[in-house]
Image (tube, helix red, strand yellow):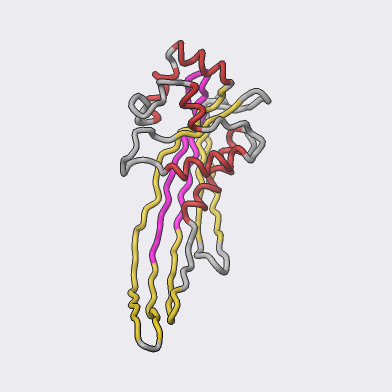
Amino acid sequence: MNQLSRRTISLFPILVCTALCGCVTATVQQVREAETSLTANDSVVVLGRRNRPSSAETEIDFISCVSKKVSGGDIRVIPEQEFVDALFPWFEPRTAPLHNSDLPELIGQPLLAERIREIGLKYLIWIEGSTQRTNSAGSMSCSIAPGGAGCFGFLSWENDSSYEAAIWDARSGRTAGRVSSDAAGTSYMPAIVIPIPIIARVKNGACTSLAEQLLSFVKNKS
């Protein structure tokens, strides 16, 4: 079987736990469909669905987080707004694609393809997903008395992050592969007079693991 047509899948579990934060478990999965490479003149862009606001949208801060971390890995990343302005009107909120499956037809338009070559774009990274609270438990009460105020109780809640990034070769109009990141963590807030939040940074864990795997993917490093 040809190496370029063979799908490869790799899983990387990550556990992060500190004294002041809740524990976060993150797992990334990679599916490669084509070889990737970058030259000094190539750039990438990280995007999400543009027809905001909507409960189905990937959070703007998550897109920004991944873009920032990828740009810190010696890769030239075009800021999202700069990319939207340069390719006006194709990626404006009213005309932008709703799903990554809409990209091949869009990228195949001759005028857009010429603009893509002009800005040196090699890979378009399209992210979908969200972070949601999945469970909560416990109770807490606070009161004010003549002698002072205080809170008593214990709260806990779980957050799950699930994101998938499709890596598109902007010059060929074909997908090079996909990288997904799933993270879960439990936050706590005990209170004996003063509430002490112990927060699991689930979304940040998903961002870090996804960005690291995207860097490895586009640089074609195992």
What residue is rendered at 44% in x and 44% in y?
163
Tell me the quarter of the picture where residue 42 sits: top right
Residue 137 position within the rendered picture, expressed as x and y whole percent measured from the top left: 34, 70
Report the side of 36 relative to 180 (left or right): right
What residue is rendered at 57% in x and 20% in y?
119
Q: Which residue is farthest bottom?
A: 147
Q: In which quarter of the image is the C terminus?
A: top right
Tell me the quarter of the picture where residue 220 sits: top right
Q: How many marks?
A: 0
Residue 86 position within the rendered picture, expressed as x and y whole percent measured from the top left: 50, 22
Q: Which residue is farthest front?
A: 146
Q: In this view, does 146 lie above or below 113?
A: below
What residue is rendered at 44% in x and 74% in y?
195
Q: What stretch is highlighted in magenta?
A: 157-184
Q: In this view, does 151 lie above or below 161?
A: below
Residue 215 position within the rendered picture, expressed as x and y whole percent measured from the top left: 60, 38
Q: Quadrant of the N terminus?
A: top right
Report the side of 25 relative to 50 (left or right): right
Residue 93 position within the rendered picture, expressed as x and y whole percent measured from the top left: 36, 29
Q: Does the magenta stretch include residue 171?
A: yes
Does the rendering let one see residue 7? no
Q: Is residue 54 magenta?
A: no
Tell me the quarter of the picture where residue 101 sits: top left
Does the rendering let one see residue 43? yes
What residue is rendered at 44% in x and 64% in y?
186
| Viewer-side residue, 143 vs 107 | 143
Q: Main secondary structure of the magenta part?
A: strand
